[in-house]
Amino acid sequence: IGGVPLNFGLSARLGAARRPAPANAALGEAPLFVIEADEYDTAFFDKRSKFVHYRPRTAVLNNLEFDHADIFDDLPAIERQFHHLVRTVPPSGRVVVNGLEESLVRVLHMGCWSEVSSFGEAVSDFAADGGPHAFDVLHRGQKVARVEWGLTGVHNQLNALAAIAAAHHVGVGPQQAAQTLGAFQNVKRRMELRGTVRGIAVYDDFAHHPTAIRTTLDGLRRSIGGSDARILAVFEPRSNTMKLGAMKAQLPWSLEPADLAFCHTAGLDWDAAQALAPLGVGPGQRAHTAADIDTLVQQVTEAARPGDHIVCMSNGGFGGVHAKLLQALQNK
């Protein structure tokens, strides 16, 4: 959906800057506005999620799981907020929903008074036939378009279906939408290649939730296939949810696709080494921890070899680890 504004003259407010555009907001001439929803609370005096104020005509519900442990007690609490969003969509509007997400199915079962368009499954309104790089778009079982683009991962394939379904509701045909996706450049900090030194690629990714980490690494693993190339996951548990340790038990699962994992432990109130113990922690093991960036960079640099893919994951600046890694690899 982030690809729509610059290609169709729409206005938008997105959660990350687009490439090549330098900003994450744009004002167009068309009478439509695309905005990335925010489930965080509105203000200290209004604990409803921000998105209840949007009043969308088209609402895309892509995925929903527990997060933001600092303001939500559990997943049902977040589901209630998403149902508030669904209730703001007018009867003439449309809710575009990922049919693979059980939590979103529960949200709709709470009550929905708008049109519903599903995507993701073979029985959905919009489905994909083929791999994430190149696939046919099926509308109620019939091929209506084909997407060929440079993004990886099943999650991005679902994102494409969501964008096509949403665009369809406002009058953009599937073929035109698919053609636009073919020229789409991903937003910054979504597997953004920061540089390649001595045959070692360094990426920046915004993943900070265990599921997002796993999805990102799975996508890269499928992209590089069964080659001898290794994946080195470098991550910072920086979000409030991760700092609280609410998701620490899921970290070994989320990092499973990586050959080596490196965790920055500064500011944590829980033992990262203990949480990562199922992977094996320490010299000669799969997982490593470091309380400061310089030590982390040293660990990764010593382990890296030509052909490796280093993925740095954080929802913050990560202490400039990307530039430091590139410099250290250059000096290796």
Image (cartoon, helix red, strand yellow):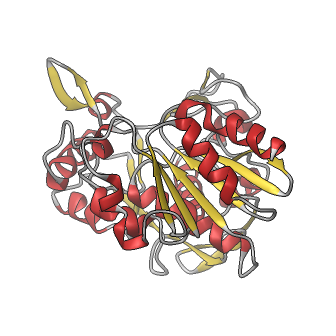
Residue at x 40%, y 43% (from the top left corner)? 265
Q: Is residue 33 visible?
A: no
Q: Position of residue 85 (x, y in %)?
A: 27, 42
Residue at x 64%, y 71% (from the top left corner)? 221
Q: Determine whether, in the image, residue 309 is placed left or right of residue 96.
A: right
Give the answer, above or below, for where 70 lies relative to 108: above
The answer to which of 20 and 266 lies nearer the viewer is 266
The answer to which of 161 and 46 lies nearer the viewer is 46
Q: Is residue 266 visible?
A: yes
Residue at x 76%, y 59% (from the top left corner)? 150
Residue at x 19%, y 31% (from the top left corner)? 48
> Which quadrant does the N terminus fall into?
top right
Q: What is the count of numbered marks?
A: 0
The answer to which of 187 and 2 lies nearer the viewer is 187
Q: Position of residue 138 (x, y in %)?
A: 60, 74
Residue farthest along the right direction in this orientation: 198
Q: Position of residue 255 (x, y in %)?
A: 47, 65
Q: Quadrant of residue 176?
A: bottom right
Q: Determine whether, in the image, residue 42 is placed left or right of residue 230.
A: left
